[in-house]
Image (spheres, rainbow, N blue to C red):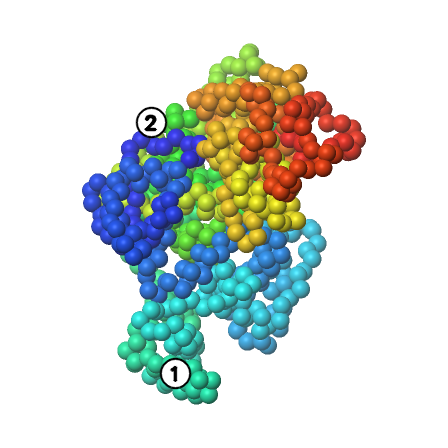
Amino acid sequence: MLDIQSSPGTPKYAFDTRDEVIVNGVSYRPQARRDWGYIFSRTDATGVAESFDNGKIAQLVQKGLLTHIRGAFLPEEVRKRDLQNSTIISAVSGRVAEGMKFRSAFVEAFLELEAKDAIKRTDSAVIRATYALQNRAAKIMGSAEEGQGQTGKHILLPKAPCPSALLRWVRNYQKDGLVGLCDGKARSGNRNRQIGVDELALMSSIIDGYADPSQPTQKAIFDRIGAAFEEKNRERALAGSALLVMPSRETVRQEIKRLDPYQTYLARHGEEAARKKFAPVGNGVQVTRRLERVEIDEWTIDLVALCAQIGLLNHLSDEEKKTLGLHKKKARWILTVAICARTRCIVAMRLSRTASKNSAVQTLEMITRDKGVWTDTFGARSPWNMFGTPELVVSDNGSGFLSFEMRAAMQDLGIRTDRPPAGIPEMRARIERVFRTMSTSLMPLLTGRTFSDVVTKGDANPEDRAALTPDELSEALVRWVVDVYHNRPHEGLDGETPANCWNRLVAEFGVQPPPDMRRRRLVFGTHLTRTLSKKGIRVLGNFYHSEELARWMLRSHNRQLAVRWYHQDIGAIGVQLGDVWVEVPAVMDELRGVSSAVWYHAVRTLRATYQKEAAVAKSVVLQAIRDIQAMNEAAMKREGVIVQDWSAENLQKIEDRLLIGFEVCDDEPVPDAGESWGTELPLPFDMVGEAPAEEIVSVDEQPNKFTDEKPATEDFGGDADAWTNESK
């Protein structure tokens, strides 16, 4: 369970009869919806039907124990589902991940040039555009590295792939998404289940040729399929294999109808003709469901210009200006906002100093979270209960949205993406109207509220001066969204408020549930590499241990393991053992559901209180956590809606400072060897007999005690894993 506070009321979730729902490892298929909930039937041979009321479903979703796979039982999605759900892109690491980033950068570069009609799908055209491809791919890969490749810096151009490889990557990407760029995963998806798999694979490879500038007729495609089946059957007859069944003309016609209408028309008639045919008229892009389409964009807030215009810079001290970043000529914050196109509700927003992959991914994560904790923290009167998994996310080609991490996260969550050309602003008109509304209604309220005391008091009482802190900016944004914007009649909703529209549609249709905890940890978790010791794996001063880790240590020499650490729940981590990701719980069970913000705040408090203590009792630590969770305001205001840096590098800095010398000890005496599970791993001689005397470790030894300062020398005289860390 996440360390969050739910919004009031019981949310209703939407499931289709073609979806799959997994609860506690049991697979179900929704059969019927009732006012009180759903009837699910097991997908195994028993077919047992079970009822799940809305409250039970909401509880399972909040705890991350319900897995929802959309369209799992759609015939044409079966093979594609097996392909994409077997590989979570965000869980891929090492050379495989680097290879995927490299391929995806060149694929994106190719598609951008193709959209501008600057390249064609021929080897000669690719060769002529080699430099343009390299230059654009370098910028795409650089943007994913937080601002590298900026103007004035030399960009090292990556080696271009051969034309045939690049064109193959483009085809694989358009068929299977990023999974198609993973080694060994470039397999085409099954388009139908009414005929055999082999027949369908051969037929689909030819039907794709219908989307071609030569504009072949359906009869010509059917004739090509007939010739291909005859040739393939001759080969199979010689090999003694069963012959393929030729599909009927109607089957071919239906398969052609399944092709994407816009992409097919675009390929056959060109971009201008496609735009004229498919351009929205009247009311523009039409959507009927909440989160069917989510638009996401960035808005720049220039605080220096804002403060200067209203004459408030003269009332701030130099220290306050520096704290707020107002001592420079410009101090800009980037506000990343996501809006539901159907209800006009703002479903996520994040503040950051620069546009980055972190701001994009954390905005996406916020869409999937119940934001009741934000409204409680900042005293909003209305709930912020708009969350779920979007069906489509529309953005521009900003570096954060184009980053590999953002695209991988969206594919892992089953979210389709669309990035309209920069010259078509009407495609993101809703989000741009929200920004205009913010600039005209939020900013005056913000400056008037924040700086009113400064204007009236002047310098008479410097210590009481108000300043635009990040906490206050977060509070203003949340209060404006939840209490003002969501409750104003909206012209695009025929006078209905966004909040009422959302609640009405949820009551009528439900909403797609957010990802389960396993997928959430793999998709949004921090990528770490940690050393496995006898005590387990340590992250942010906490040990994580399980039976799987014990067995792994006995049978494998590999001690450097890939880890996924999710800052919203530090009660468990994901660890890759071979090709499998397993959940490993914290040795301290009470950390289940505790966020890193609460843990960080608790450790800082304890370090200040027990400066001279070598170890802090477990009961004291847990009480501190409970106290902070009860308040929760301090921890949440520390975060607000500001993008948090829980990267591997920053996590290491925190560990290297705050947690050195901090140790949690048991309240009871150290248990004997038979009760030490989760503290030490059994060694081979523990299982087969008595160990040599020099290898036996007394269980009566006192735990290591550390001083508050790390020794000057790097030779600590012991196991490096004995050190814990975090930042002051």
Q: For the residues marked 1 and 2, what is the alpha-carbon distance in whole angstroms? A: 68 Å
Q: Which mark is residue 381?
A: 2
Q: Amino acid at mark 1?
A: Leu
Query: Which image quadrant is residue 708 in?
Result: top right
Considering every residue shown, the one lying at the far top of the view is 460
Query: Which image quadrant is residue 284 in?
Result: bottom left
Which tag, 1 or 2, sits closer to the chain's start? 1
CB of mark 1 within 8 Å of CB of mark 2? no
Between marks 1 and 2 in the image, the one whose residue lies nearer the viewer: 1
Give the SS element for disc 2. Answer: loop
Considering every residue shown, the one lying at the far front of the view is 689
Q: Give the number of callouts.
A: 2
Residue at 54%, 65% in the rendered image: 184
Q: Answer whether residue 249 is visible to the viewer in this image.
A: yes
Percent from the top left, x then y, of residue 30? 27, 51
Residue of label 1: 243
The crowding category of the residue bearing disc 1, from other C-alpha atoms within 10 Å (few below 14, some 14 to 19, many at least 20), is some
Q: Which mark is residue 289?
A: none
Percent from the top left, x then y, of residue 503? 27, 39
